[in-house]
Amino acid sequence: SKVILLQKRPAGKPVLTDFEFKNESVAQPGKNELLLKTQYVSVDPYLRGRMSDAKSYVPPFKVGDPIQSGIVAEVTESNHPDFKEGDFVSGNLDWKEIQVSDGKGLTVIDKEAASPSAYLGILGMTGLTAYLGLTEIGKPQKGETLVVSGAAGAVGSVVGQIGKILGCKVIGIAGSEKKIALLKDKFGFDEAINYKTTEDMQQAIKDAAPEGVDIYFDNVGGEISDAVLANINKFGRVPVCGAISLYNNTEVSLGPRVQAILVKNSALMQGFIVSNFADKFPEAIKTLTTWLKEGKLNYTETIVEGFDEIPQAFIDLFEGKNEGKMIVKV
Ligand code: NDP
């Protein structure tokens, strides 16, 4: 069975030769173990951080070890009381076609309630990030203006829709005309700005939000965020979810840039990782599931087929090739 290892730490933008494919023989599951067949693999921007050796909130991958990410797998053999053959489980697993697990950290998913891949997106890590980052830090109030960057991605598309459900005016920023149309037509955003074709982002945001920005949900960092923050309102809130525009930089300048804007507006900027809110996951999943059932929430996935395509799908995140959640179907 195939496994994908980290061959070397990417320098700048990841490339295919940073990854290595190997064949390994599959062990038999022992007592209290199960055999898993990978079905869906989540590729995520944060994995780029784990491929570097810088200290972070999750330890770096070791060179020569399998990469891990969120995976939905089928239980094909079980010697574990909590799992049976035919169950679908989700959890953080190795990039392997087949693997043995002790069941720790795995959750049996309900295949009838939603498609299995949804548990890697809207009903998984990215849905939770959107919901909890927005409600716990953004604290949206009816009538406020919310700007989301990375708006057509897995997190961003959900943030914008929740903003609409909670009564905000929502403006999305994304990188293609197709994504701009998707934001307005499928996800109900009030305005959408293509950062790749807009000369003056600061002015474009001002035009879209003449009343100013109350909440900026930041997925990208860098110059896009500078332009939004220049329009932040008094007592504005800025949940800092990610900074994908900077992940491949070998040097990031950390000089003072937005402090004066924050002071002037008494604005709050707060970074977070979704696991900070782990105690709220059950409640959040319940709400997301209800909104999905009621048709208030939509989602899109970009599904790439084939185990061998996992590294390329990951690399493509940095080219914006995905709409909604990027997933590999094995
Ligand atoms: P997405 O589905 O949003 O995919 C990444 C998207 O980022 C691409 O489609 C692309 O869209 C955009 N992008 C890529 N490069 C750039 C760039 N240089 N400048 C601006 N946009 C760029 O991924 P996720 O929804 O999974 O993640 C979104 C963000 O949230 C990431 O920063 C991620 O690290 C973060 N995150 C944080 C979590 C937390 O706990 N704090 C948990 C999960 C995610 P486009 O075509 O618009 O450029």
Image: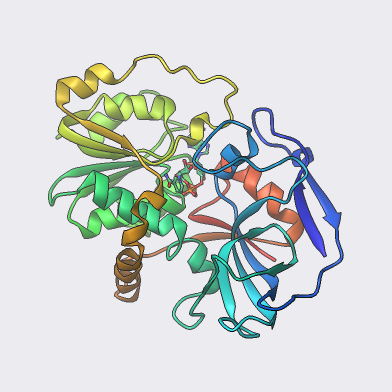
Residue 54 visible in the displayed image? yes
Could you say which quadrant of the image residue 83 lies in? bottom right
Is 288 on the left or on the right of 234, as rendered?
right
Question: How far from the left and from the top, in percent, is residue 173?
Answer: 38, 40
Is 217 on the left or on the right of 304, as rendered?
left
Q: Nearer the viewer, residue 246 or 177?
A: 246
Task: Specify the farthest residue to the front.
Answer: 31
Residue at (63%, 47%) from the top-left corner? 314
Residue 209 visible in the displayed image? no
Q: Which corner quadrant holds the C terminus? A: bottom right
Q: Which corner quadrant holds the N terminus? A: bottom right
Question: How far from the left and from the top, in percent, is residue 251?
Answer: 56, 19
Is 227 on the left or on the right of 35, as rendered?
left
Is 268 on the left or on the right of 82, as rendered?
left
Residue at (19%, 49%) from the top-left corner? 140
Could you say which quadrant of the image residue 98 lies in? bottom right
Residue at (29%, 75%) from the top-left corner? 294
